[in-house]
Amino acid sequence: MLDVALKFKAAFVLLAMRDKNFHEVVKVNNKGVSYSDWNDARSGLPFLKIFYDSTIHIFGSSYVTGHMYMKEVFGLRKKIHHYCESSDESIKKMASTMKENFIKYWENPDDINILLLIDCSSS
């Protein structure tokens, strides 16, 4: 959806100029959408797309197997770590937050469903 909004950026900018209530409807940090918000959206799109693609890959199939699931999870881990080294501060911040969440759910072996790991080893 963000990629579609970026395609219609000019329409949103025009709407904001013509409709005084536009900024009341669309708020970012309690103010209207700014030029830097559009830049952040554009630069963050490739990072967010990796999660979209993984979600479609896993949940878009009627028969997800453990090895496919774990491959996506560990692929996301590698990409998150890569984006944590980004020179773009907004991407780096977003990736760091994602990394914290990833660690919360996946770094502790006691919290991972052991059946997923068993299925991976048998594949």
Image (tube, helix red, strand yellow):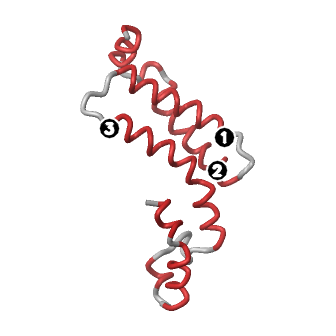
Could you tell which of marks 2 and 3 lies nearer the N-terminus?
A: 3
Q: How many marks?
A: 3
Which image quarter holds the N terminus?
Answer: bottom left
Distance (Cα) linking label 2 and label 3? 26 Å
At 60% from the left edge and 60% from the top edge, which residue is drawn?
Answer: 42
The picture quadrant where one finds residue 90 is: bottom right
Label 3: how many Cα within 10 Å (few below 14, some 14–19, many 20+): few
The three-letter code of the residue at mark 2 reads: Ile
x, y percent for residue 45: 56, 53
Label 2: how many Cα within 10 Å (few below 14, some 14–19, many 20+): many
At 35% from the left edge and 21% from the top edge, which residue is drawn?
Answer: 66
**CB under 8 Å between discs 2 and 1:** no
Q: Nearer the viewer, mark 2 or mark 3?
A: 3
The residue where tag 2 is placed is: 91
The three-letter code of the residue at mark 3 reads: Phe
Query: On residue 84, which mark appears?
Result: 1
x, y percent for residue 94: 59, 49
Q: Which secondary structure lies at badge 1?
A: loop
At 30% from the left edge and 27% from the top edge, which residue is drawn?
Answer: 64
Q: Which secondary structure lies at badge 3?
A: helix
Could you tell which of marks 2 and 1 lies nearer the N-terminus?
A: 1
Q: Nearer the viewer, mark 3 or mark 1?
A: 3
The three-letter code of the residue at mark 1 reads: Cys
At 36% from the left edge and 11% from the top edge, which residue is drawn?
Answer: 118
The residue where tag 3 is placed is: 59
Does 54 sit above or below residue 28? Answer: above
x, y percent for residue 67: 39, 20
